[in-house]
Amino acid sequence: MANHILFFTAFILLPALGTSDSILAQFRNIKKRNADDVTINGIEFYSIKIDCKVTSRFAHNVITSRAVNRANISKEVIFDVDLPKTAFITNFTMTIDGVTYPGNIKEKEVAKKQYEKAVSKGQTAGLVKASGRKTEKFTVSVNIAAASKVTFELTYEELLKRQFGKYEMFIKVKPKQLVKNFEVQVNIFEPQGIRELEAEGTFITNDLSDVIKKSFSGKKGQVSFKPTLNQQRTCANCSTTLLDGDFTIKYDVERGKPNDLQIVNGYFVHFFAPTDLQNLPKNVVFIIDISGSMSGREIEQTREALLKILDDIKGDDYFNFILFGSVIYTWKDTLVKATAENLEEARKFVRAIDTEGATNLHGGLMRGIEMLNTAYEKNIVPQRSTSIIIMLTDGQPNVGLSDPQQIQESVKKAIQEKYPLYNLGFGYGVDYNFLEKLALENKGLARRIYPDSDSAIQLQGFYDEVSNPMLSDVELNYPENSVSDLTNNNFKHFYDGSEIVVAGRIVDNDLNSLTADVKAQGADNDVTFIAQGDVKEITEALQEQEYIFGDYTERLWGYLTIQQLLEKRIAATGDEKENLTAKALELSLKYKFVTPLTSMIVTKPEDYDNQAGLADKPIEAEARSAPVTHQVSSVSFLYRQPAPPTWYTSGITVNGQLIGDKRTSNKAKIQNTYFGKLGIANKHLDLKLTVTPEKITLQNGNEKSVFNWLDSVNLQQEGLTLIINKEKTLVLSMGGGASFVVVLHQVWKKHPLHQGFLGLYVIDSHKLSEQTHGLLGQFFHPIDFNIVEIHPGSDPKKPDATMIVKNNELTVTRGWQKDYRKDTRHGLDIPCWFVHNSGAGLIDGVHTDYIVSSIF
């Protein structure tokens, strides 16, 4: 059969604004001569304003960026911001030369179809993805003509959470260049009155500390940060900016009474945070994974965290440790009181914890539940005490009961809603979906512990959040004939420094006041709190300030309701899940929130290269998984046809022609494809390199040189290094960026099936720009994905699984690929997940987007 020949191109934008060291030096000299030059690659962001309005803990934030193209040719402008993961995007507009192009929020499938239709006409640009522990990155780009201006405006909303006695607003400040008009403006209005207000930034120097202006009086508070151009500089004559880090605002309200009940425009919100309560004695069972995968740094950090936690355990608390590998170990047969002697003995036990065996997660959990049940039955712990289970694991169950669904059913039946289960997933190898469902079904929550130098601090930080229960079995009740559509009003615990929030709709339009009855169990007896909300009082309070967004109670109710519906949906199945999904989708569309059920489609003018962008809301199980950086071979494609290509951009391009075997083997289900020709070009240096298994052709301007693979070549000239190792490899560097390695795979010319081909690798890939793209180029950025539900496939040696990536669930197959970087003759077998259907759902766009007409 005839060979199918297609082309692909991997696009690489040159790093650092230059195409050679000399050009970069000239650029820097210009910078020194003109200290006010605030453009990068011809683009100047001359104004960035972050405007935040907080009313009763609900934050409405607008980020406005204005840019102008100072170059004499069209340029790409990229707008990217980091948003809190708890936030919902509500609006986005882009205005080019006075014409506004809005983003429209639609049901995910509807938006996807519109997006794919736009993609078929041009390029894609907009997306939201996880970018850190606390943030998600929103990115959109557009090409604008010379001297044109563009304004980006992004709006998002979130409910500020109270932890350790303060509300926290987190703003990521990272303009990446000097900005003539940079400003953060925060206005806070709290009807209870503001008690304290702080503002700090990780990037704030002594000189910048005075630039932060903050004040509060009564119900109002303000924070502003507006550094001048010179104050932004890293040094007197530098063109680099100091503004790179986290800007955090913390505040709390007056606590004259434990309840604050506000009624506005037919909706109410109830904030409950009593003070001066006695701590409830608590009983904690720590269930720790000691399987082999926890060895090394992870178990060291776990020991470190547990030792610090032991220092914080109170004398009235009871505790125990359960370790699970293949076998279950317990420190003590029962829970023990936190006496000085027991704590010292526990420290010795923790220091000796080591790893062994597999992962009997179910066995560890069941032992912990049984231990708590026995402690209450035998009156080992106080009857008026509260109990929690904290489990830490880094893997998936593979010993004992290992089916996730069966484990969920077994644990739920055993706990019977008596104890909250908190699951901490260490690293990216865990099945986070499973841990989250397991926790939510048992009145707890899941938290990912990021594998980093501060993992021990993360573990201890979580414990600190739940270490001080003040009340248990908290129930907030309202008159049935006065309210409807309540958010969650039953809570297992109230922790010191936190806050319980309940919202609902007012049924009686003539209602002048609302009374709430709060019941809970305290340390010594049952307690009752009464809250009174007065319509007239809150209306008068709201009239005192000017920066209110009047429907905040309704939007807060919508935000909270959607969050809780999505949370319930995680553990739901069947009709219940469908109903929860339908309700959450309806509210997401009504209030124009980008949630996991909706997307924002940004349709841009057809006169511009970038036609459409799709913004999705990531979720923890999908988008906060292992980043695969600079390892193209870690995610492989299984193509039903020869692999396809991508679109064109500026800088360095790498194009490849794919060839197949001379004929298809009778046993082969698919046709294998290889690189038969590579074309690497740098248009700024006017260089083109063509590589085939027979020869290497270098075209430098009008000069053309041809080399044979039998030659040994070491060519170095301005902006170019070309090294040919006889019959083995070619190394190419252009413009001081990343280097390319081409490996020659020789095949006997008369081989009946195979033919010679090339392998392509990149070294110093950290030098690649963030805009690197292409069929392969897109995988040189961190990719967030998770592998779950591993099960036998059609080939017993190659299991199938589900890959959760980019809000898609893809069926993937385990296999092996050859890595020839170290052994160019035999290669090294490395494990891969093969993605079917031409990479659909994993690659940006569709595979036919990557076809080009020629090698250059």
Image (cartoon, rainbow, N blue to C red):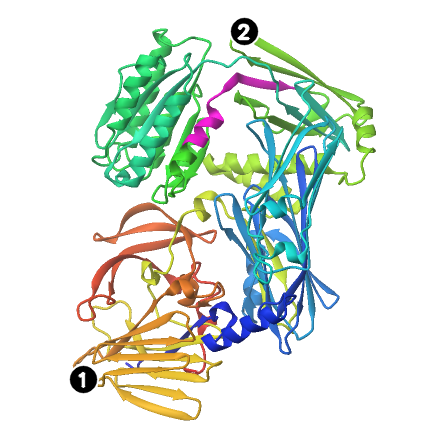
The quarter of the picture where residue 371 lies is top left
Magenta-drawn segment = 460-477
Question: Residue at horizontal 36%, vertical 71%?
Answer: 739
Up the image or down, 130 lies above or below 700; here it is above
Residue underneath mark 1: 749
Q: Which mark is residue 253?
A: none
CA gap, disc 2 to disc 1? Answer: 89 Å
Whole-percent x, y for residue 418 in the image: 43, 18
**Side of 673 where 626 appears, left or right:** right
Q: What kind of element bears circle 1? A: loop
Whole-percent x, y for residue 34 in the image: 63, 70
Q: Is residue 704 magenta?
A: no
Residue 114 in view in this figure: no
Residue underneath mark 2: 525
**Which residue is at the front of the view, 646 or 98?**
98
Amino acid type indicated by mark 2: Asn
The quarter of the picture where residue 448 lies is top left
Up the image or down, 177 lies above or below 28; here it is above
Q: Please state, as top left, top right, bottom left or bottom right, where the N terminus lies in the image.
A: bottom left
Estimate how packed mark 2 is, as few (under 14), some (14 to 19) or many (20 or more) residues with alpha carbons within 10 Å.
few
Up the image or down, 450 lies above or below 690; here it is above
Q: What kind of element bears circle 2? A: loop
Q: Across the whole image, how many numbered discs are drawn on residues?
A: 2
